Amino acid sequence: MLELSGIGSRYGRIPALSGIDLKVAEGELVALVGANGAGKSTLLRVISGVQPATGQILFLGEDIGAVPPEQRVRLGIVQVPEGRQVFGPLSVEDNLRLGAYTRGRAERGAELERVYELFPALKERRRQAAGVLSGGQQQMLAMGRGLMAKPRLLLLDEPSMGLAPRLVEEIFARVRVLKAARTTIFLVDQNARAALAVADRGYVLETGRVVLSGTGAALLADGQVREAYLGM
């Protein structure tokens, strides 16, 4: 579904990514792990089209390097941003409906019910302002808003950031449900153990370069990964 070849990107004169080659197949959950500042979020921004890059990005076999971000959403590439970034004054349901701006009225209703089924707490609070939700509920809202766009490729950026361990488990339980439904997911998370445990395949990023790749299970068992990212 997604193929990156020779991707490079920089912030001014500072290189952020260099020579990234990466693939995500349809129905796969692929995790990208690495230390803070390794370039993980930058790579998601490149895929979304909001960060300039060199190299080639193929989506469903088509080169989308020159396609603007809003058109990439219409193609099916949807990003759930780091830090949740919900619209605090708006209600939960209005936040969700904003995620479906590319869909027709009938589709919006069907996707809303799907999101409420996945996140029952959001349905209970659908009339409340998003800004009063807990951090975990706001993360669910951000994920639900992304799902409202009916993505072909869902980009999850640090979904466990700032959450208590119990809430991290809850968020990753929902990620497993999406995976079981064959949603194609590219997941970035500093919680390498949780990310690789749920991933079909994974990549390890260091200072803007891919240094390791393999199945999620193989990377979890890799001594280098265990020492650097799992504290073992």
Image (cartoon, rainbow, N blue to C red):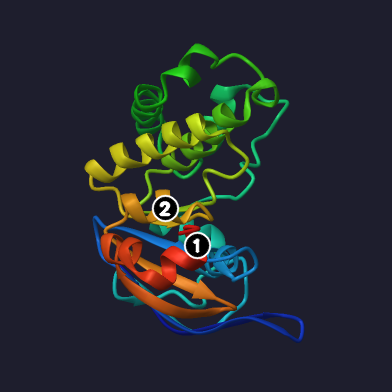
Q: Horizontally, is 215 left or right of 54 in the view?
A: left
* Mark closest to the chain's N terminus, 2 or 1: 2
Res. 154 in view: no
Residue reaching furthest right? 12
- Seen at 60% across and 68% down, the residue is 42
Does 117 appear above or below 79?
above
Q: Quadrant of residue 232?
A: bottom left
Q: Residues within 10 Å of mark 2 (few under 14, many from 20)?
A: some
Inspect the image, locate mark 2, and give the three-letter code of the amino acid beneath it. Arg
Q: CA distance from mark 2 to mark 1?
A: 8 Å
Inspect the image, locate mark 1, and give the three-letter code of the amino acid beneath it. Tyr
Determine which residue is flagged by label 2.
193
Does 81 appear above or below 22?
above
- Seen at 62% across and 70% down, the residue is 51
Q: Quadrant of residue 204?
A: bottom left
Q: Which numbered disc covers residue 80? A: none
- The kind of secondary structure element at disc 2 is helix
Does 165 appear above or below 8?
above
Determine which residue is flagged by label 1.
229
Does 144 appear above or below 209?
above
- The kind of secondary structure element at disc 1 is helix
- Seen at 43% across and 68% down, the residue is 225
Q: Quadrant of residue 211?
A: bottom left
Q: Horizontally, is 36 left or right of 112 in the view?
A: right
- Image position, residue 197 (x, y; %): 33, 51
The reply to whether dot 2 and dot 1 touch (C-beta < 8 Å) is yes
Q: Residues within 10 Å of mark 1 (few under 14, many from 20)?
A: some
- Image position, residue 41 (x, y; %): 58, 62
- Seen at 29% across and 75% down, the residue is 61
